[in-house]
Image: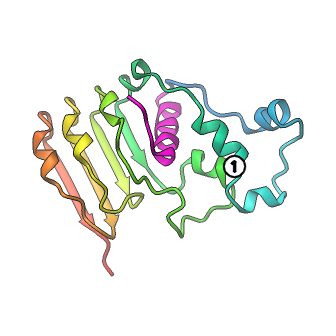
Amino acid sequence: MTIRDPNLKLTLLQCLWAEGLLPPFDREAFFSDKLGQPYDPGAAYNNRVDDRVRDALVATSLPNELLAKLKLLQWDGGDDAFHYVWTNWYGDDETFFVTNFDGLEACTELEEILFGVGFNGIDIAPLGALPNLAEIKLWGTKRLPDLRPLLKAPALRRAQISAEDN
């Protein structure tokens, strides 16, 4: 399966790093080895999306065999993956929102999904195909998705979905 959404891929990378299934990204080594310059925390590239970092992270191969080992998918605006791409991002816009869950079916051992904001009414049909998904929490969205696909998730025992109060 192919992960089409670059923000979903960043989220998966973050979770794979957290579970120790992939070595974490080394920003200093990336700047030194790939860009031929030291990382500068005061540089202007920290105040916007750094396409060089984003492109490198999104190009990371995530074979189905690796994705199948993931147990938890969690989106949080404070995740390292997002701050490697845009160091000084404050989470007050939708830059890193996931817009598509296609390809998530490869995460066959996924047991839990936690998304605080990070999505808005997107198609959650791929989640219904996850055989081990037992719990899902989606909160803070502006638009609730069609929840019927979750009825197909055979192991789902708990779903907590809430919309943003505006």
Frontmost residue, 5 versus 53? 5
In this figure, which residue is indicated by the disc labeled 1? 51
Q: Residue furthest right?
A: 37
Quarter of the image with the N terminus is top left
Boundaries of the magenta span: 1-19
Image height of 122 relative to 25, above or below:
below
> With 128 as the anchor, is 113 left or right in this view?
right
Q: Residue at x 33, y 28 (%)?
A: 106
Residue 47 image position (x, y, % from top left):
73, 62
Q: Residues within 10 Å of mark 1 (few under 14, many from 20)?
A: few
Majority secondary structure of magenta residues: helix
Q: Residue at x 31, y 56 (%)?
A: 122
Q: Residue at x 58, y 45 (%)?
A: 81
> With 95 as the anchor, is 38 left or right in this view?
right
Frontmost residue, 138 versus 124? 124
Q: Amino acid at mark 1?
A: Asp
Image-quadrant location for residue 134: top left
Q: Is residue 9 magenta?
A: yes
Residue 82 image position (x, y, % from top left):
58, 50
Quarter of the image with the C terminus is bottom left
Residue 45 image position (x, y, % from top left):
78, 56
